[in-house]
Amino acid sequence: MNQHLVATFAAVVAAFIVQAQEFSALPEYRQAGEVSGTIRALGNHYMDPILVRWEEGFRKYQPRVQFENRSLSTAHAIAALYFNVADIGLMGREIAPLENLAFRRMFKYDPTELAVATGSYNVPFQTFAFAILVHKDNPLTQITFDQLAGIFGCRSGRNIRTWDQLGLRGIYAHKPIHVYGYATGSNLASFFELKVFKANASGGPTLPEGARWNCDLREYSNVYDARDKVQTDSGDLMMRDLGQDPYGIAYCGIASKTALVKTLAVSEKPDGPFVEMKRATIMDRSYPLTRSMYIYVNRAPGKPLDPKLKEFLTYILSRQGQESMTGQEVFYPLTAKAAQRELKKIE
């Protein structure tokens, strides 16, 4: 058998063993009491398969609860909360600044955000993690968030614009860094802003400390046909161009990776650890540009959640709820640490 396939299989098996250990560390769902009524769910249609699993599993413990699901898109979720046509908003990304602003204008507080699943490794359109990629001949092997912010952002006195600023010599010395990414203002770019530039979801379009995107960023968007179907993926276009540019760097979904480019190990901190992007490091959430699936609810500060909502959300974040996601290859369960962090938000 091909050695690469053996190594890949071994890594996946190891990840599932770790995942089984993570499940055992999660608290079991135990009813705080019997609840009844209808829970209205609206939002990201890609979450339908795992939402149905959660609902079916929950009703084994709470049979008097019914569900009304409306599968639209992430873009509808927050509006559904503030117009009170849904109790939970399903989102394949973090809330956008303008969505948060609209909610705050209505209620004077932020919606409660709960990460409920880990995003995909390489499935297009389904909350995929971001790889940092360069041309295959580039000698760079790793990069930090601060360096990425200096490359992709525009920060007074701290910009990184040439490859020698990253320690490269020879043909790379004093050569400009060509930056590639998704269209600024897109939801994909917003995640990069939140994670790498440390933007605040309620802070509006301006990045921290007045910083903005590198004005030389080459921006990519999907190409659509006359029926509004994706004809060419933005990532495929980006990787086609990066593969011809020895001085380029991009953030992109790994599904679009070609043989002409390579990924860099990434660290959130200046001194490491540097983590390679692999399925296993997405599953264990150690890769810094791993993404999450979210549920948002309207909970006023200092006020308890509706009991049936609290029970359902507690179930989702329990061992039984997270374990129910096994057997599908799109989204992954949270780690025990991540689930416990989210549970504290609904105590």
Image (cartoon, rainbow, N blue to C red):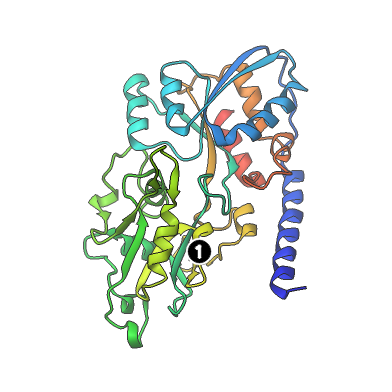
Question: Is residue 264 shown left or right of residue 312?
Answer: left
- Circle 1 Cα neighbour tier, 10 Å, few/some/many (<14 / 14–19 / ≥20): many
Name above or below for residue 112 compared with residue 262.
above
Question: Is residue 268 shown left or right of residue 346?
Answer: left
Q: Residue at x 21, y 61 (%)?
A: 156
Q: Identify the residue under disc 1.
A: 257
Task: Residue 115 in the image: state x and y as whole percent.
Answer: 55, 38
Name above or below for residue 83 compared with residue 54.
above
Location of the N terminus (image quadrant):
bottom right
Of residues 310 and 68, the one nearer the viewer is 68
| Quadrant of the rendered image containing residue 135 | bottom left
Q: Residue at x 57, y 28 (%)?
A: 346
Q: Residue at x 33, y 82 (%)?
A: 172
Task: Residue 123 in the image: state x and y as whole percent.
Answer: 56, 50
Q: Residue at x 23, y 58 (%)?
A: 215
Determine the residue located farthest toward the bottom in the rendered image. Answer: 170
